[in-house]
Image: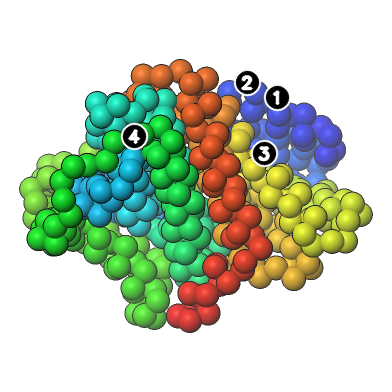
Amino acid sequence: MTLIMGIVFLVTLLFGVPIAFVVGIASLVTIIIQGVIPLNAIPQYMFIGLDSFPLLAIPFFILAGELMGRSGISRSLIDFCLVLFGRMPGALAEVNIGVSIFFAGITGAAVADTAAVGSILIPAMKKEGYGAAYSAAVTSASSCIGPIIPPSIILVVYGIAANVSIASLLIAGILPGILLGVCQGILALFQAIRHKYPRRSEKFSIIQLVQAFIRALPALIMPLIIVGGIMGGVTTATEAAAIAVVYSLFVGLVNASIKFKDLPEIIFKASITVGMVLMVLATAKLFSNVLVMNQIPTMLSDAFLSISSNPVVIILMINLLLLIVGMFMEISAACIILAPILLPVVVQLGFDPVHFGIIMCVNLALGLATPPVGATLYVGCRIAKVSMAEITTAILPYLLASIVALLIITFVPEISLLLPSLFI
């Protein structure tokens, strides 16, 4: 049955079937052959995957991100980062990475980051002498920080799948996300020195910094609402997400970038995204139940432990598995399917569930910038007007820098667990 399910899964995936239907069809074929679940019970199993109060944070975060994306915050964040990093070699590459860190705390979505930031910075980088493929690669790679720093949909999904505190996960993602940006920033600095990429000629000015900070303040307050509310014990993750929606709407109405007549369109667009995510979660939950019924988690755990009893070897194998899965599979589906399977293995090795959640989500997020189906790569290619082959070559050093950050996160658990231990 495992072989049949795997073949159906791979065949439908290779034919380009949407991941929600890939997972659902593989589950349905297995259920029909085995007959262990009545067909009329399938909707109930799928609904169980969505019957969770913390899951409400996902539509709120998506709507808040949509509202903030329409409020024109990208330009103010770029101006702020230009003042901060403009004197460094390769200024625009550093600005690109810095904006992604700030933007991650607003939308939590990698593809939205690539589209919003890339549409402004990629043409600017090309104009200043950066290669088109390099500009797109920096944007695509730095956008992977988005799913790690709160608000993070993937961390909410992992928390539900693994029954781990979502508040702890969101707080735990802050330092690893920043570390990912720092590693990419160091690489950008070395590449700028080597290739003599330009730096901005303007002198650093405190007055300019204050002015840029004030203009960017409405955007910078958004992460503080989410993180501050959770860390202060004032709100749950779901409540913080709902407050973020209200704040995002307020900012958009005040600066006149959003009008009341725009709300139906914004809500409709957010609803489409929410529907896609929830459909994936529902079918993935069904798939996860089928895996458990066939004892696949137990078999996989025994397989890992039979190869080696060394925790370092096993966690490296799991990292490799997650990187490969992230290259081909939608990250929410991968998370909800693999978290219940892999978590017992790593807990047996002494890993904290929150720490492993960060490891898993960083791995899967990197898949968004990894060929052959990396979503941020396709957006970057379209904006920069380059081929997939060109951007793949340019992004490899950034993927290696990100893997270095991943290994540090894996073997230095304090990076993930420090803030939750202090505030949760």
What is the distance, in whole Å, between disc 2 and disc 1 at their CAs? 6 Å
Marks 2 & 1, CB-CB < 8 Å contact: yes
Q: CA distance from mark 4 to mark 1?
A: 45 Å
Name which residue type carries label 2: Phe
For the question of whether residue 396 can be seen, the reply is yes
The local secondary structure at tag 2 comes to loop
Whichever of labels 2 and 3 marks the residue nearer the N terminus, that label is: 2
Q: Secondary structure at mark 3?
A: helix
Residue 11 tag number: 1
Q: What x and y, as percent, mark residue 413?
A: 61, 68
Task: Please state which of residues 125 and 351 is positioned toward the viewer in this rendering.
Answer: 125
Residue sitting nearer the eye, 60 or 102? 102
Q: Position of residue 314 (x, y in %)?
A: 79, 55
Q: Earlier in the sequence, mark 4 or mark 1?
A: 1
Q: Earlier in the sequence, mark 3 or mark 4?
A: 4
Q: Residues within 10 Å of mark 3 (few under 14, many from 20)?
A: some
Badge 1 density bin: few <14, some 14–19, many ≥20, Cα 10 Å: few
**Image mark for residue 197:** 4
- Residue at position x 77%, y 29% in the image: 7
Q: Give the colour scheme of this rendering.
A: rainbow
Task: State the residue position of label 3.
Answer: 324
Give the mark, 3 or 1, whose residue is nearer the N terminus: 1
Question: Which residue type does callout 4 highlight?
Answer: Tyr
